[in-house]
Image (cartoon, grey):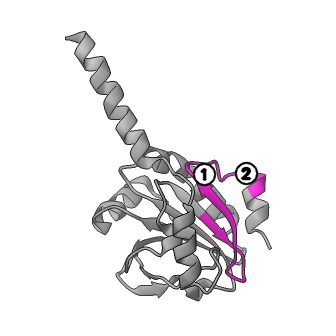
Amino acid sequence: MFKIKIPLIIAVLLVAVAGCSSGVISSDKEEEYSKITGGSTSALPNFILLDVNGKQVSLESFKGKKVFVNLWASWCPPCRAEMPSIQKLYEKTASQNVQFVLLALDNDFTTSLQFINKTGFTFPVYYPGAALPSLFNVEGIPATFIFNEKGELVKHISGGANYDSKEFLKLLSN
């Protein structure tokens, strides 16, 4: 009986980690995105988000600010693990010209909001209002994209990271 449980536990953990772990953008996706954006694979996408009140917001409307986009889901352990560091970065950059967009990929936005409310995070949470743009069609989550004020992608992180660092604070500071 004990021998059966260990392989089963290992299999479940591998599936969970593989489901959340991120890969890089494939060249096929880069080509497709390049066609949509007129040659740029790194422009802030024109993409509709829904805020916590169900109001539509265009991601492109944040151009002029540095934009921190994090793709996550409440069921993803690496996503949950990095959230406290995102919260700290969000608090440290509150006076800066930065927009945080934590894009929830749960099947139901209510699940995402319940998780956020339970944990006490205060960063802005959104839900896709349309199909994800090609740039955000990643192999796994968490995935983070940081854009400068011009809407140019300056950093893409696949997988979890510690965002409560001097590197990210400097990247988002004016």
Q: Residue at x 32, y 68 (%)?
A: 109
Q: Crowding near pointer 2: few (<14 within 10 Å), some, many (20+)? A: few
Left or right: where does residue 111 sit relative to residue 141?
A: left
Q: Outermost residue, left direction?
A: 1
Q: Nearer the viewer, residue 4 or 29?
A: 29
Provide the residue designation for mark 2: 165
Q: Which label is found at residue 49?
A: none
Residue 90's place in the image compared with 5, above or below, is below
How far apart marks 1 and 2 lie (CA) works out to 8 Å
Q: Nearer the viewer, residue 130 or 80?
A: 130
The amino acid marked with disc number 2 is Ser
Query: Residue 55: x percent and y percent?
Result: 38, 86
Count of numbered badges drawn on the protein: 2
Would you say the residues marked 1 and 2 are in contact, meaning their CB atoms lie under 8 Å apart?
yes
Provide the residue designation for mark 1: 85
Q: Secondary structure at mark 1?
A: helix
Is there any visible trace of residue 174 in the rendered image?
A: yes
Task: Answer with the quarter of the image where residue 155 lies.
Answer: bottom right
- Span highlighted in magenta in the image: 145-167
Residue 55, magenta (yes or no): no
Q: Residue at x 41, y 59 (%)?
A: 116
